[in-house]
Amino acid sequence: MPQDILVLNTRPERQAKPLTNKITRLGAKVIECPSLKIIGLDRDVEKINKTKFKNDDVIIFTSANAVY
């Protein structure tokens, strides 16, 4: 990765550093600018099954944060 590349890392603050470190090791400059805040939801699976997704046939999770 050329040194003249600047990457904007918008990962949440707790998760930004590992990505920043990897990109920096490749030679790019990184600006950390967290633009998301991950907030946990109710983990009672039975309650979730009965309310939030009762009319859905499929649920697709797009990130580890969505499943955690």
Image (cartoon, grey):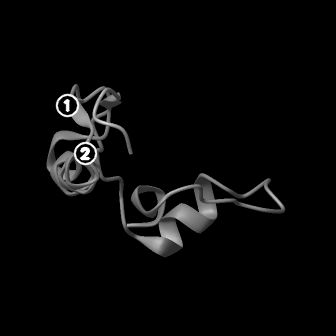
Horizontally, residue 10 falls left or right of residue 33, namely right
- Tag shown at residue 27: 2
Disc with the residue nearer the chain's start (1 vs 2): 2
Q: Residue at x 35, y 53 (%)?
A: 41
Instruction: From the viewer's perspective, tell me whether residue 64 is left or right of residue 12.
Output: right
Label drawn at residue 15? none
Q: Which x, y percent locates residue 32?
A: 19, 31
User: Which quadrant of the structure image shows residue 3?
Assistant: top left
Mark toward the viewer: 1 or 2: 2
Instruction: Please state the horizontal and vertical placement of residue 58, each as a whole percent of the image.
Output: 79, 62
The span from disc 1 to disc 2 (Cα, nearest Å) is 16 Å
Give the number of the disc on residue 32: 1
Q: Name the secondary structure under disc 1.
A: strand
Residue 2 higher or lower than 33, as above or below:
below
Is 2 located above or below residue 19 in the figure? above
Instruction: Establish if 4 lies above or below 48.
Output: above
Circles 1 and 2: CB atoms closer than 8 Å: no
* Residue depicted at x 50% and y 57%: 63
Residue 26 x/y as whole percent = 29, 52
Pointer 2: residues within 10 angstroms few (<14), some, or many (20+)? Answer: some
* Amino acid bearing label 2: Gly
Front one among 52 and 19: 19
Q: Is residue 7 left or right of residue 13?
A: right
